[in-house]
Amino acid sequence: MGEAFSRAVAGAATLRMLGSMSMDAVAIAEGRFGVLLAHSVKPWDEHPGAAIIRGVGGVVGHVDAAGVGWYVAGLPTAVAQVCDALAAPEVVST
């Protein structure tokens, strides 16, 4: 799971978490954050923030990587980049 996360955040200037997904979603709606990334998210955590983000023209994506489901939400371009990075083939070292 660490490799998938590392790929997803490789291009990020800063990583921040406000403590709740709804607060992160509000930060995206206000233009303070570009994308929200989390794994193993329950519907009751996802849906309120997804509604806020979609309400301001953002998008939501779901990707399975490293054995878990990832939730990605925010600006359309940022979501596409993070989803692509998560979906990239994982390197297995021998």
Image (cartoon, rainbow, N blue to C red):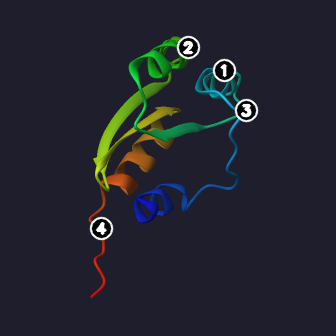
Q: Which residue is mark 1?
A: 26
Q: Residue at x 71, y 22 (%)?
A: 30
Which of pointers 4 and 1 lies earlier in the amino acid sequence?
A: 1
Asked if the residues shown at circle 2 and circle 1 are in contact, with their CB atoms under 8 angstroms apart, the answer is yes
Asked if the residues shown at circle 4 and circle 1 are in contact, with their CB atoms under 8 angstroms apart, the answer is no
Q: Which residue is mark 4?
A: 90
Q: Nearer the viewer, residue 2 or 51?
A: 2
Which of pointers 2 and 1 lies earlier in the amino acid sequence?
A: 1
Which of pointers 3 and 1 lies earlier in the amino acid sequence?
A: 1
Disc 3: CA contacts within 10 A as few (<14), some (14-19) or many (>=20): few
Disc 1: CA contacts within 10 A as few (<14), some (14-19) or many (>=20): some
Q: Which mark is residue 34?
A: none
Is residue 93 shown above or below 78? below
User: The residue under label 1 is which amino acid type?
Assistant: Val
**Residue 94 at x, y percent in the picture:** 27, 88
Asked if the residues shown at circle 4 and circle 3 are in contact, with their CB atoms under 8 angstroms apart, the answer is no
In terms of image quadrants, where is residue 43? top left
